[in-house]
Image: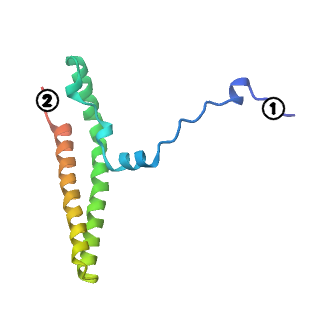
Amino acid sequence: MTERLKPEQENPAPAPPALPFRTLLYRFMFFDWLFRDVSAARNRFERHAALQHNKYMSRYLPVYLRRWSVLATFDFGLGFLFERGLQATALSACFFTWSCMTVTGMVVIVVAWLLLTFGRFS
């Protein structure tokens, strides 16, 4: 015997369109798309809802911190490799500069996480 599919099973819902690679890469490295703008709220209720949403989404900031720490370690390692191993000082300076910028980004992530997780907002 063959089973017949019900009409709702024959045409399943279409899959959502895949995001472009650039968007995925941006969302993988940067976290601003997770949060809502509290200053754009029109009243106290919307401001409170945006703040609660931001506090809830702050749980993902340590994931971004780990990603940025891997990037900083990778940049510092490449800078060390190019300076010591290949004697390419200009190229190593570029990698050391990027490692300093990623460490600065890590500080921003830590401060945002601490304020959203442990901060008291009135």
> Residue farthest to the front?
90
Q: 74 or 5, which is in the foreground?
A: 74
Q: Are marks 2 and 1 in contact (CB under 8 Å)?
A: no
Circle 1 residue: 3
Q: Residues within 10 Å of mark 1 (few under 14, many from 20)?
A: few
Quarter of the view holding residue 60? top left
In the displayed structure, does residue 101 sit left or right of residue 60?
Answer: left
The disc, 2 or 1, on the residue closer to the chain's N-terminal end is 1
Q: What quarter of the picture does the C terminus occupy?
A: top left
Q: What quarter of the picture does the N terminus occupy?
A: top right
Circle 2 residue: 121
Which residue sits at x=53%, y=38%? 17
Q: 57 or 17, which is in the foreground?
A: 17
Instruction: Please tell me the numbered disc located at residue 97.
Output: none
Which residue sits at x=41%, y=45%? 23
In the displayed structure, does residue 32 sit left or right of residue 23?
Answer: left
Q: 91 or 29, which is in the foreground?
A: 91
Which residue sits at x=27%, y=71%? 77
| Amino acid on which the number 2 mark rests in the picture | Phe
Quarter of the view holding residue 10? top right
Mark 2 → mark 1, Cα distance in angstroms: 60 Å
Which residue sits at x=26%, y=27%? 50
- Residue 89 rendering spot, x and y as whole percentages: 21, 77
- Find numbered disc 2 in the image and state the secondary structure of the residue it sits on: loop
- Residue 102 rendering spot, x and y as whole percentages: 23, 57
| Amino acid on which the number 1 mark rests in the picture | Glu
